Image (cartoon, rainbow, N blue to C red):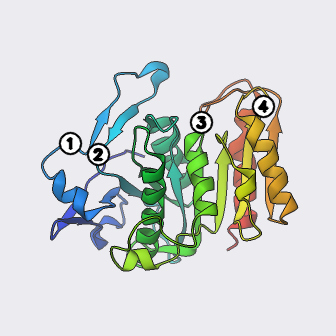
């Protein structure tokens, strides 16, 4: 899949066009906040980090948060859809390893992917607003984007996993004043996938949490909150699947390694087939 983002501006706000989902699917970028679109008109909406170690493209600053829709090949039925939350300690976004590469993988499974560029650096509460707003916009555009918003999930990596988990605990009300009709729609995901998540909060788990898939390794220091979180899901009778590997570290994404944890996409795909029923 070639990653090419573009956007269409209507009355000062970037929206998706029905032409964006065609026989030859192309990505479409939608900016989340109308006021920021106006503020950054004709200016960069993000800034790359100078650190590209390990072959990872890192976004160091996001001035105007957005979502980019990567549609799957069109069929007669609306496709499932997954919002992708890259990690980066809320300091940067690992936009390829934990963003566009994940979108490509999901597309190959017949799933529309949407990559979230949330507020960084060091703006956790703003990032929560971004993901809540993104979910409403996705549901608002479900017909136009030919997606099934009853099969709308979220996948997060590292800090993105923390953000996805925060969404699962904070969907009843928005963390900001309502802007438009998108903010009146539910921002609750139907399912959630947490891949080497960071800083989970077991005490925030409730009986209404969406079904959850988790991958973590014992040699990842962040596992100390993941195990209690998985136990909390079980304690609240939330349908969940937790895979804990001995080794693998942190930040592997989809990139192959000799560690058994590199098999997590196969396990996740199996779980998705059951979770996203035809």
Q: Counting residues from the N terminus, which is met first, the one under dot 4 or under dot 2?
A: 2
Q: Residue at x 81, y 46 (%)?
A: 228
Residue at label 3?
253
Residue at label 1?
44
Task: Judge left or right: residue 186 versus residue 192.
Answer: left
Residue at label 2?
63
| Labelled pair 1, 2 in contact (Cβ < 8 Å) | yes
Q: Nearer the viewer, residue 120 or 216?
A: 120
Rendered location of residue 82, percent (x, y) = 55, 60
Foreground tag (1 vs 3):
1
How many other residues sit within 10 Å of disc 2, few (<14), some (14-19) or many (≥20)? many
| Labelled pair 4, 1 in contact (Cβ < 8 Å) | no
Q: How far apart are labels 3 and 4 at the CA level?
A: 13 Å
Instruction: Look at the image and tell me whether residue 163 can be seen.
Output: yes
Rendered location of residue 238, percent (x, y) = 80, 65
**Which SS class for mark 4?**
helix
Task: Judge left or right: residue 232 versus residue 276.
Answer: right
Residue at label 4?
260
Task: Judge left or right: residue 211 versus residue 13.
Answer: right
Task: Judge left or right: residue 200 versus residue 178.
Answer: right
Q: Which residue is drawn at 34% across and 61% down?
A: 32
């Amino acid at each position: 899949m070639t990653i090419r983002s573009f956007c269409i501006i209507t009355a000062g706000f970037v929206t998706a066009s029905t032409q964006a989902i065609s026989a030859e699917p192309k990505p479409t970028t939608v900016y989340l906040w109308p006021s920021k679109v106006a503020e950054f008109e004709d200016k960069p909406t993000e800034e790359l980090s100078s650190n590209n170690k390990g072959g990872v493209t890192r976004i160091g600053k996001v001035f105007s948060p957005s979502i980019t829709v990567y549609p799957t090949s069109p069929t007669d039925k609306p496709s499932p859809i997954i919002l992708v939350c890259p990690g980066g300690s809320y300091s940067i976004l690992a936009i390829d390893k934990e963003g566009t590469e994940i979108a490509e993988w999901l597309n190959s499974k017949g799933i529309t992917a949407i990559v979230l560029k949330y507020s960084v650096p060091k703006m956790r509460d703003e990032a929560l607003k971004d993901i809540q707003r993104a979910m409403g916009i996705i549901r608002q555009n479900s017909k136009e984007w030919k997606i099934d918003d009853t099969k709308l999930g979220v996948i997060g990596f590292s800090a993105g996993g923390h953000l996805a988990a925060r969404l699962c605990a904070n969907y009843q009300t928005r963390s900001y004043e309502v802007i438009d009709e998108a903010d009146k729609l539910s921002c609750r995901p139907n399912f959630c996938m947490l891949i080497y998540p960071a800083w989970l909060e077991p005490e925030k788990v409730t009986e209404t949490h969406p079904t959850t898939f988790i991958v973590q390794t014992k040699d990842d220091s962040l596992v100390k909150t993941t195990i209690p979180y998985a136990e909390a899901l079980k304690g609240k009778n939330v349908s969940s699947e937790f895979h804990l590997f001995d080794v693998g570290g942190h930040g592997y994404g989809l990139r192959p390694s000799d560690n058994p944890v590199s098999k997590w996409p196969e396990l996740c795909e199996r779980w998705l087939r059951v979770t996203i029923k035809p």
